[in-house]
Amino acid sequence: MNCFQNSIHKSHRYKMNTSCGGGYCDCGDIEAWKMGPVCENHESGGAESNPQCELEDGLSERCRMLFSILLHYAVDMMVWQREEQELCLELQPRQKNDLYYCILFNDEHHSFSQVNYTLKKALNCSTEEAQVHSILIDKEGRKSVKYSSKKTCQETQEAISKISNEISGWSLQTAVLHSSLVAHQTFALRLSSWFTNIIGFHSGFRQIFCQVAVEEPSPEEPCCLTRLMLWDSKLFKGARKTFHELMVSSFLLETECKKLFAVEFTKLYKQLQKDFIEDDHEPHISVISLAVQIFTVPTVARYLLEEQNVITVMVECLLEMFSKYLDKNKFHFLNHNTDKLSRAQFPIQDLRYILISKPTDWTEKLRTAFLDGFRAFLSLLMCMQGMEEVKRQFGQHVEEEPHWESAFSLQLQLKYILTMFQEWCASDEEVLLKAYMMCHSAVMEYGKEAHLKDSVVLYLAGHLLNSRPYMVSVEPVSIHLPLTRLLAGLHAQLSRTGAISKLCNYFTEEDLNVDLLIEYPLRCLVLVAQVAAEMWKRNGLSLVSQVYFYRDVKWRQEMYDKDIIMLQIGASRMDPNLFLMLILRRFELFELFKKPFLHKDKDVKKQLSRMAEEMLHLLIIIVGERYNIGVSHVTKDDIIMREIIHLLCIEPMSHSELTKALPEDENHETGLEKVIQKVATFRKPVGSSCGVYEVKKESLKEFNPFFYHYSKSQQTKAEEVQKKIRKAEHDSEAFPPPVPPKFCPAFSDIVKILNCDVMIHIIKTILRKTVRMRETLWNEAIIQRILHLISLALLEEKQQLENEPEEEVSFDFYQKATKIENIGGERISILSLLDKLKQNFHFQTQIDMIMWTLKIFDSLRLLRERSVGASAVVLNPEVPKAEENAHDKEKAERKRKAEAAKLHREKIMAQMSAMQKNFIEKHKLLYEDRAEMQEVGESDVDKESIEMVVDDTRIGVGPEQGTSMLKKEILTCILCQEEQEVKINKPAMVLTACIQRSTVLTQNKGKVLPKTENFNPLFMNADLSWGTHTGSCGHVMHAACWQKYFEAVQSSSHNRFHAEVVFDLENGEYLCPLCKCLCNTVIPLVPVQYQKMDKENADIIAQMLSFSRWQEIVLARISGLRAFNSKERDDAQMPPTGMAVVSSDFRSVLNFGVQPFTVYSTSIQEMLTVFATAAYRVGLEIVPNEADPRVPVMGWSTCAFTIQCIESLLEYEGKSLFGSLQNRQHGNLKALVQFATAQRVTAMQDVIQKHLTNLLPVLLPNMYSEETPSILDIDLFHVLVSVVCAFPSIYSEGSMNLQPTALSSTYNELFIFHLVTMAHIVQILLTAAKDCPALMEECEESEESHLASCLYNKLVQHTNRCLNSNVSGWYLWEHVKKGITPYLRCAALFFYFLHGVSAPEVLHSASSEGHFEALCSYLALPTNLFLLFKKYQECVNILLYRWCSNLRLADMQKEEQTVLRYPRKINKLVELPEEYSCLLNQTCHFRCPKSLDDDQKHPVLCLICGAILCSQNTCCQETVDGEELGACTIHAIHCAAGFGIFLRIRDCDVILMAGRNRGCLYSAPYVDEYGETDPGLKRGNPLHLSHEHYKQLNLLWQQHGITAEVSRNQDVNSLFILDWQHM
């Protein structure tokens, strides 16, 4: 990657691919590059380079001797013939022992778990020990599992063999070797690694090593290189890798040595391939994988071709390996071994490597060698010709579908080879002609059976045809004809190069035997037509699949396209009448055009009609499809442009869609980028969508509805789209054929088909019977094709008349079409029949095409009648000039009518709108009464709400809060579709919800989450290290309906094998009935309670209840509650007498502010308990327990945390606080806040009071205990929510369940909020102290900065002057303002959904101007927040002392612990490099930290924290709670509470994980220049970071949408379930 990054190729168009490694860097290899073979580093000499100076003679001799001894020793040790074989005397140990190793080898027949089980049973070891053995066996290829005496090791060997055979039917390979032999083999491997290192120091060492490796000790004994290659399939994995690395670093780095290696490799090629087939190891660790390193080098490939006849060797090897599949000299792949068959095809890839470099100069030696290889290749194709024949099934459906995939797989493998052979032949005329003769002889040899049948004489339209009887619908037919198609390709090359003029020197017309050449392709095309006509339905889906792939883009170049070319060859060399008669005969339509059709069977009529369509379509293709090199004068660019135009006529397509739809060459290039700008415009991607190409308007004239690569559905869709376009432009809907390019001379006679007698007869027959409507056989599709054929003929004649003198034009379709004949007593011609057809209402959809054809007839008449010497009439090929005026008038008339219709519609709509307004005005009273009736309610709350006057006061907290905007909430259940108003005394309605643990808001990645069994969640950590988030899709149900639905899901889940993967019923999970979003509980909908303010007592309370007085009363009440709940009053913090006095004072002051508990219906109370328990269960990950005192705490916590998540999300997206809330977010927050305040009615009041007494000591003085945390350690917004929700419990005592009135609540909430806000300001100042700049001169001191400085000085005193005293007041104010804004935004959301008071309009806007002031106004705060400390100055000192006197604060000042700074940073996924190649470069040398080998792993990048992990490998698996988990799963547990977002770097896709057993694949944020992702790097285009895609992924994480995305993906792809826990 470093060489690539520093080369000129970095700016080129390149492709990226991933592989398992191997080979070496091509930097500096001249043959590997067309330009820029050296990077900047190596070109300038900056990198290491091997010295090229020669070695000294003495050193060279010593190296040769040493290398020879060591290499022979290493080879002897590894190429060990038998277990019983003993070491030579020199190598045996001095002291012999009887210790042996039982060694177990790796294979591909047994799974990891099977080897574990076998070892555990055979060795009687633990699971962990067996796993260690299995891992090492899988990595190294072998591992000693027993070290003991020979007898013991043999017993172990027998046990392993027996157990493994019982569980899989295959025995694990084992060996018992003496310990000294194993030691020598281990040393031999080390020695091989030493060789690899030592020869890297000097090229002289490398050359000497290569010479030693190929030296033969004796004529009978092979060289070391040969021995290693022949023994390769018997070596274990580790030894193979070592020796392959040695070969690569020695032979393949020197040109001459590479040739030596290539020669030896070619000599052993057949044996190596045979060994490879029997080998069970993966291909990349076989010596066969080194073929690409030698066969792709042009000089080496040519040398092997000339000297070693490598093509013949490879083809003969293929024939030998495929000989077992021969049946009557044809391949028949029945009951074959798929793995061995795929391995047998590897020589095809090597053959492709050899043919990559086409020669520019030919020698006689090269010609001879190539033609020998070509002859051998024809023998292979002869075995494929006619293989896998099929026969039409009658009566009964085929019992067993035949196997067809292997034959098509072989065809696909040979696709590029066939093209390369044709290009090689075309590069030399002599080779091309000889190859054509050889191929023609082979085709004649195959088709000689067709000559054995007697011919039958057929008569039609005055012509006779001698045809041999054959019916595709009755006799066997094959779709595989590679030999005939190769001949068609060679014939096209003859036409392209001009060598076809010399063909007459080798063949006479009779010797060419054209009718036999086209026989088999014609049969194949008839088979395709009959399948389309549903005549082969009883043959099953296998034949349908074969026909589909026959025309698929991957196969069609060497199958369907070549069949068309062969028929065009026949049409150009046969009599056109006989050619058409033969086609009619093979399509079994001959009798249809000879005599009247009398068959009454509807199915037969339908089949014949479809066959007639297909036959006419084939004729259109033969005459009209000329975009093939050699058939007409076109280039590859012309062909690609035409393909693109017709693809884009269907619909706009992305770059990848176009690439998939276009054929690839041998280099996997389509040529798209070269021509796309000429015919299409690129519409750039918008947002996260990909860009698409749209066809240019001027290119639409090339549209042909009968484009031969269209499928039936594509043709229909393309026609519909183009008709819509033309209709919108008020243009003619006719689709005349575009002007085709001229045929090459060899194919020019094809056009004679259009005006031959048989064609005229076919056209007249169809038109005459259609006009008379005596038969229903001829449908609109047939008429459309007939019109297209007539148009082709007319355009051909017009072109000839325009380009040539009239007397030289022999094409006379016009005369034959206008000639009147007497048929059946009628005087008709083609022209007169068309005149009658345009009046037939059954074919009105074709009227435009008929009119266009008639106009062409008129233009030809003018051309024919022009006088000699008159100026030539220049005609437009699409619209004749003679008729331009008429056409323009017709177009103008259509446009005028369309505009008139539009004006008429607008007039009618205006009249309707006026009538509606008039009706409303007349019945205005009725509408007003209806509106009033809808607002009338039954309860007192409703009556009061009607009397409410809209209050402009926008204050959400305190006694001055504005009026609640309450509306009747009538919702519809998504299950029963019944409406119900949400009321406290009615059955509960619930909101679908999903609760999940979350680390989205924390910056402290990887913090160990607390053990939840004994954990007290009352206080949230300041860093928000984890929380409980509640989300909802916003769908509402009755509680009873939901319970029934959940029970039904439980009962039906047993029938869905993947249900437990999509959702876990044991944890209460289910899918939303409407949107299928994953949920695990429901939130009860509790209405906002309107409580009328007692304005009369408001002034009294304001005078009596100051903040200090409220604080004293709360302290006294809390102390009293502590004493009351204590078992011994003597242990209370205050004496009982004092408590009684203060408690009495407490009641006397607020006795008017108490009211009974709100009474909820039983259903609502049950649902409150359900949701509270669910939050407790999920948040703490423990068994549900309704009696646990932590249940209400988790309810408050999930409410606060969810508010913080949504506020952070809105801030990240730059949206307004209130105006941008989605409906589901609004409903979710409203339900959560109302639940948090209402759930206390279902809990024990003494539990709520206990939580309150533990919460308030953080804020209030004189209540401190050792368990009270510092304000630096906690999140104060969680404290605010919890205290506000729990505070009403302070009014309850014993069995008296009371709550404050609305007025009392407003004062309580105001003082609580002000108290928490002041604490948060102090929190911000204390944590910002280290970052404060030194005191600076200020231009003008403001009130805010002055008060900030005063408060800060007090904090300096209370912290024993640990804080920096020289801090600017303006800085403190700005820092507090910035740091407290997120807290104020969260508080605004909380109080908005608590009371329903509308927020100021500024908070509905995304603009930040006036945002802070509006927040302060809504929350009853002064804009200068420091005025709170001035307002409550009598309490400030004691509060500051409480908040600052804490050991945690002292530790912070000593910098012993890190402190969170405010505002908290908004969490984002890690930053990624802009270029994907940079990311690949960063991780290309990644090695697993837990593995000692050099195997490249599957690195994944955690996008949450940036850690790189080793995925999908056993080395990083760990056992957690008795379950084997992979690295990603374990990391997700520690990093993000079980959720994970991992980028698989070598696959360029993202893994989303939601728990241990759930995950899905997601698009990576890297896209190419067309805005498309590339999972798996299949296209390989350069990728760059898409910030839109990455933002979308970031939002998915911040919105807690991973669970929903995973469940949705798994529900769709339920059949493709992976072991996510092992990722």
Image (spheres, rainbow, N blue to C red):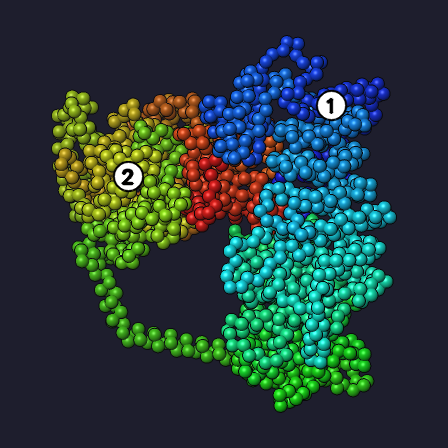
Residue situated furthest top in the rendering: 95
Mark 2 against mark 1, which lies toward the viewer?
1
The correct choice, above or below, for 1108 with respect to 396 in the image is above
Mark 2 and mark 1: Cα distance apart in space: 73 Å
Quarter of the picture containing the N terminus is top right
The residue nearer to you, when weighing 1080 against 573, is: 573
Q: Which amino acid lies under the numbered mark 1 shown in the image of this protein?
A: Leu
Local crowd size for mark 1, using a 10 Å CA cut-off: few (<14), some (14–19), many (≥20): many
Q: Residue 1575's spot in the image, x, y percent?
A: 56, 46
The disc placed on residue 71 is 1
Q: Quadrant of residue 740?
A: bottom right
The residue labelled by disc 2 is 1173
Q: Residue at x 19, y 51 (%)?
A: 985
Picture residue at 76% right of the left edge, 20% below the top = 69
Residue 192 coordinates in the image, percent (x, y): 69, 24
Label 1 sits on a secondary structure element that is: helix
In this view, 171 is above or below 829: above
Q: Disc 2 residue type?
A: Thr
